[in-house]
Amino acid sequence: MLVIRTPDERLTWLQALGSRRKEDVTAGVPPLFTGFLITDGYKAYQRLLPRLAGIQQCCAHVIRRCRAVTKLGPGSLQSWAADVISILREAHQAVEQARARGDTALGPEMLDKLRHRYDEAAAFGITHNRLRDWHDGNHPGYAPSCWLQEYKEQVWLFNREFAVEWTSNKAVIRSPMRVRAAGVSRPWFARGRKCLTGRGFAGEVPVSVRGGYLVGWRDGGRRVIPASRSARASSWACSPAS
């Protein structure tokens, strides 16, 4: 399921995707959309960059990956990842404070200091993990540090464009819902006490939500992608959730 949502949450675009292949993902974004896209780090979205105002890498995803690296060793050598988490949170707080003052940009001195600390942390991760042995190849801290360096302009877009959120949390399913279906459920997105369901379907199927994301239908063992493929051809309707 591809979810595109405006920052004020007044408009939500839903698109059932047949797969996570780059062709399906990029084709799912409406051609008329030319704004800022907040993504989860999936590289396929880079294909859309020429027609977008910009891409913001979701900092919640960045923080989650960095947190996983901090649990690795040896010792405290991966503390650079914790530094990245702290720096991004400081940057977000600085943006919120600037917005509250009515500013439209961060002070250049503050931004330069934050960016310099971020660059140093990423460089430390690259240097100390490049040749570090791991049982199945490069140390798991190496790829994230390289990614942070390669996509740093997209990680930091929210500091230059105050209209851009620093995470994609507003596109996350917010509450458990029930979806009307007959064997195969309709792909859906929940907001408040309403959900999108299939018109003319009978019965109700509890859905499985993990960490805010729809991961499957508990009854019948159907997963999201197979069920979405089966349900894409029918019409949509809106009904209250119980």
Image (cartoon, helix red, strand yellow):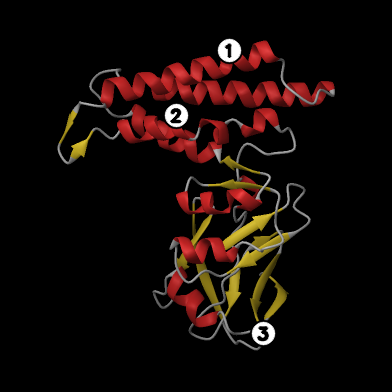
**Circle 3 sits on which residue?**
199
| Residue 171 located left or right of residue 65 | right
Instruction: Sort mark 1 into few (<14), some (14-19) or many (20+) by Cα contacts within 10 Å.
Output: few
User: Camera-side residue: 106 or 199?
Assistant: 106
Residue 43 visible at all: yes
* Vertical position of residue 150 compared to residue 2: above or below: above
Amino acid identity at mark 1 = Lys
**Circle 2 sits on which residue?**
149
Q: To which quarter of the image does residue 168 belong?
A: top right
Q: Position of residue 106 (x, y in %)?
A: 72, 20
Q: Secondary structure at mark 1?
A: helix
User: Camera-side residue: 174 or 144?
Assistant: 144
Q: Secondary structure at mark 3?
A: loop
Amino acid identity at mark 3 = Arg
The disc placed on residue 205 is none
Q: Please name the residue shown 48% across and 33% down the image.
A: 63
Q: To which quarter of the image does residue 189 belong?
A: bottom right
Q: Secondary structure at mark 2?
A: helix
Instruction: Sort mark 2 into few (<14), some (14-19) or many (20+) by Cα contacts within 10 Å.
Output: some
User: Camera-side residue: 140 or 109?
Assistant: 109
Q: Are marks 1 and 2 in contact (CB under 8 Å)?
A: no
Q: Position of residue 87 (x, y in %)?
A: 53, 21
Q: Please name the residue shown 25% across and 25% down the image.
A: 73
- Figure quadrant of the N terminus: bottom right
| Residue 131 located left or right of residue 34 | left
